[in-house]
Amino acid sequence: MQTIADLHLHSKYSRATSPQMEPEMMSLWAKKKGIDILGTGDFTHPAYLKELQSKLTEDGSGLLSLKQSSDKLLVTSPLRFMLTGEISCIYKHNDKTRRVHLCVNIPDFKTAEKINKELEKRKCNIRSDGRPIIGLSARDLTELCLEANEKTTIIPAHIWTPWFAVFGSKSGYDSLEECFEDMTPHIYAVETGISSDPEMNWRLSQLDNITLLSNSDAHSPANLGREANVFDLKERTYDEIYEVIKNKDLKKFLYTIEFFPQEGKYYFDGHRACNFSCSPQESKEKYKNICPKCNRPLILGVNYRIDDLADRDLGFKPKNKVPFKNIVPLQEIIAEVLQRGKKTKGVTAIYEDMIEKGENEFNILLNLKREDLEEISNDIIAEGILRVREGKVNIEPGYDGEFGVVKVF
């Protein structure tokens, strides 16, 4: 059965995150989006773990469901949760300060309690933030989590982000082996992040046998599913998803759902404060990696870093690739048609009406035919959705923490 999973997000216990990021509201938005399995985020935070234990129930599948609620949407929701979290490792390795973010997926509360207990035993502060900052290396955290449960999945998060990623230009490594050392065989997947797509990652032969995952890293309910993974699962269990990821099962991993990577915050090089951005080619050949406005080193983006480490040209397609589909969130398409902000009342009203008539956002963006789209909206919105499916968009690339701007028309 087709299953859409978004396995990296944050709860209200993380900094700069909406107070609505709690199981009930996440469940409501997952239904709107068409998500079947959703990460809980932040299981390492003791207060949030208690909240999850009070609101979610285990059924032996390794996934969890929301307990009964008076809200009909929640009672009837088929949504399942997976216990997930993101941990920030900041440490010295090979004479360099490293900042590596790791996603951790686990099958039960017992494992969460073991990991949290061991982290606190090692003097890690897991109570101050939903995404804790710890002094353990990526290698040592991997070992700790696998000792708690051998089926823990460790996934390097948004692997190209300059400041906090395994391949980041500011504090990362040039290979997974350099980072994880003897634990490398236990790293089955990486998260490509908003600013890169699978095709960009196919340029690295070292990732050929690594599963490329895409998740939203959402900090608010409306951003759930902006990137996601589409599986064909028999039973929807933790073990089945674990095996799909571990073995890069192309029969069960159908495709990923992607932002256009240019819309990501770190696609191009530049300086946000200087309102300046440029392509990697311009950075190297014209500016010598120096900002022409302030004469300081540019923040080198994802595209630049991939170009540095790649051993293939863009366009190469490995034999064992998982396909992908690009989307633009429905509210952004409606907002462009109306020429209003995506959070305005008019845009929200049309969005909610389309969701009610079109089942969910993913069904609308990926599946409905033109005549069906016109029936639940109008011919211009329908045209916009179809243009996105065909990749006919114009994008001003993001850089140095500034999101890119997508124009469908």
Image: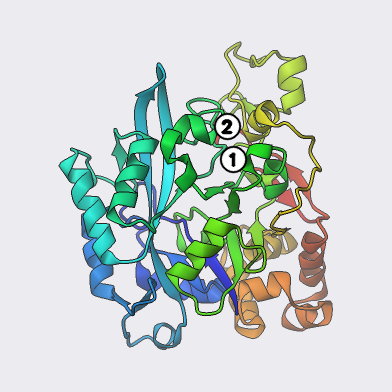
Q: Is residue 288 left or right of residue 70?
A: right
Of residues 198 and 260, the one drawn nearer to the viewer in this rendering: 198
Task: Kindly state the secondary structure of the residue where label 2 is placed.
Answer: loop
The image shows residue 146, relative to residue 280, as above or below, that is: below
Q: Position of residue 237 (x, y in %)?
A: 45, 73
Q: Callout 2, which amino acid?
A: Asp
Of residues 345 and 219, the one drawn nearer to the viewer in this rendering: 219
Q: Is residue 88 left or right of residue 362?
A: left
Residue drawn at point x = 78 percent, y = 63 percent: 389
Q: Which residue is mark 2?
A: 400
Q: Callout 1, which amino acid?
A: Lys
Residue 254 visible at all = yes
Q: Verify CB contact (< 8 Å) between mark 2 and mark 1.
A: yes
Q: Quadrant of the C terminus?
A: bottom right
Q: Which residue is mark 1?
A: 265
Residue drawn at point x = 66 percent, y = 45 percent: 208
Residue drawn at point x = 40 percent, y = 82 percent: 74
Q: Position of residue 189 (x, y in %)?
A: 54, 50
Q: Position of residue 217 (x, y in %)?
A: 49, 53
Q: Which mark is residue 152?
A: none
Q: Dot 2: few (<14), some (14–19), or many (≥20) neighbours within 10 Å?
A: many
